[in-house]
Amino acid sequence: MMCAAQIGQRGRSVLLLEHARKLAEKIRISGGGRCNFTNRHCGPENFLSQNPHFCRSALARYTPQHFIALVERYRIEYEERTLGQLFCAGSAQQIIDMLKSECERGGVHWHMPCEVRTVAREGAEFVVDTDHGICRARSLVVATGGLSVPKIGAGPFGYRMAEQFGLKIVPPRPALVPLSFGPETLARLGDLSGISIDAEVACNGGRFRENLLLTHRGLSGPAILQISSYWRPGDAIEIDLLPGRDAETWFLSEQSSRTQFNNLLAQALPKRFAQQWCEAHDAVRPLNQFPAGALRALAHDLHHWQVKPSGTLGYNKAEVTLGGVDTDGLSSKTMEAKTVTGLFFIGEVVDVTGQLGGFNFQWAWASGHAAGQVA
C-alpha cells in the first residue's frame, strides 16, 4: 500500500493485487493490536542482511520522522514506549485505514481477493494471469512478505517469483521467534514457566538487555526474540542474569553471613528461579560455608549462564523471516532487480530483517517508498 500510494500519487496507473480476503492482517495483529509502526532510533545497525549496507539508502530517504508526519497528518494519536518504540494509542486499524486512504489519493485500483496464477515477461511488459483476468504492466512490484505467520496467508510466492527471473534467495528461516528446550533442559526448568527476568542475552555478536520469559517450551520475551535472529542450531546463548551488578563484589561482601545463598540471590532474581538455579549449581547453603573462590565462580556463572536451545518454535510463532531475495541482485536506491528492468522487490521478501521494536515496519515503509518513486 505504501508503494502503490506513492506510484499513484505520481500520476501513474496502479493495480494492487491482494490475495487475502482481509486487508493488512499483519499490521492489524502487530503490537498486540496497537501496531508498533516505527522506532525513533531506526538506523542500519538495527537490521540483519548478508549485505548490511544495503538498507542505508532507503532508510536515509524515508525516515521514521517521515512516517510520523504522515501519522500526525491523519490525526492518529500514538504513544512512545521503551527504546523509541511508537504505537497507536488506539488501534492498528488506524494505520491500515491511513494507508488505504493514501492509496485512494493516488487513484489505486484493487483486485482483492485475487489469486495470481502465473507471471511472465513479454517484451517490455509483465503479464500477470489472475482469477480476475490478465493484467499487463511495465512495472511489477513484489511485496509478498516472508514465511512468518502462515495462518494469515504467508508463503513462498515472492521467493519463487524471484527465482523465476534469475534472482538468488538467501535461505529463509524464522526470526524474532521463541526458542525451545530439549527434554532434559525442560525437565530442569519447565516448572518455572511464567517467570520473567531482566537479563542481557548474547549470541554470535548480538547482545540485548530486555526481559527474558521462561515458558513451558523454552525461552521467550523481548530479549530472546531479539537474540533468536542471531542464534543458529547447535549454538549456546549466554545470559547475564545480573546485568549492571557486580555479583562477585556483592557475594564477597556477604561471605561471613549465615544467610542461605539462594535467599541472597532471591533479592535480585525471582525466588523460584533463584532456588532452582542454586540447586542446579549445588549452592543451597549458607554464604559462610563458601570459600571466596566458589563465590567468584558462582558470580561468573550468573553473569555467563550458558543455555543451548534445541530449536525455535517455527514460522507459526515467528514475527518475521530472516533471509529472502538476495540484495546483490537489487538496486539499493530503487529496489529494482538489476537484470530485469521494471521488476521490484520490497519489504520482508528481501534479505533485510529488522530487530524487534518497529524496525521491520520502517523497512516496509522505506523500501516501499523507494520503489514507489520510480516504478
Image: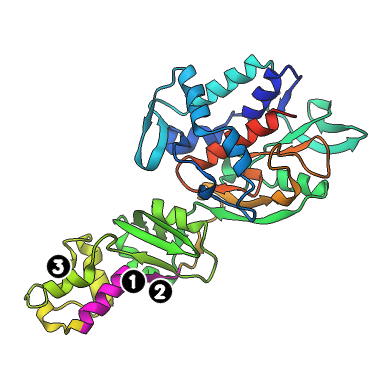
Residue drawn 67% across the image and 37% down it: 143
Asked whether the beta carbons under mark 2 and mark 1 sit within 8 Å of each other, the answer is yes
Kindly state the secondary structure of the residue where label 2 is placed.
helix
On the image, which quarter does residue 182 sit in?
bottom left
Residue drawn 56% across the image and 45% down it: 149
Image coordinates for residue 285, horizontal then vertical, percent: 14, 78
Kindly state the secondary structure of the residue where label 1 is placed.
helix
- Which mark is drawn over residue 184? 2
Kindly state the secondary structure of the residue where label 3 is placed.
helix
Asked whether the beta carbons under mark 3 and mark 2 sit within 8 Å of each other, the answer is no
10 Å neighbourhood of mark 2: few (<14), some, or many (≥20)?
few
Image coordinates for residue 163, horizontal then vertical, percent: 79, 50
Sequence-first tag of 3 and 2: 2
| Magenta stretch encompasses residue 296 | yes
Image coordinates for residue 287, horizontal then vertical, percent: 12, 77
- Return the residue at label 3: 264
Question: For the residue marked with disc 1, what is the amino acid?
Answer: Arg
Main SS type for the magenta part? helix
- How far is the residue under mark 3 from the one under mark 1? 21 Å
Give left or right: position of 200 versus 364: left
Give the residues in magenta: 293-308
Question: Which of the pair 30/57 is nearer the observer?
Answer: 57
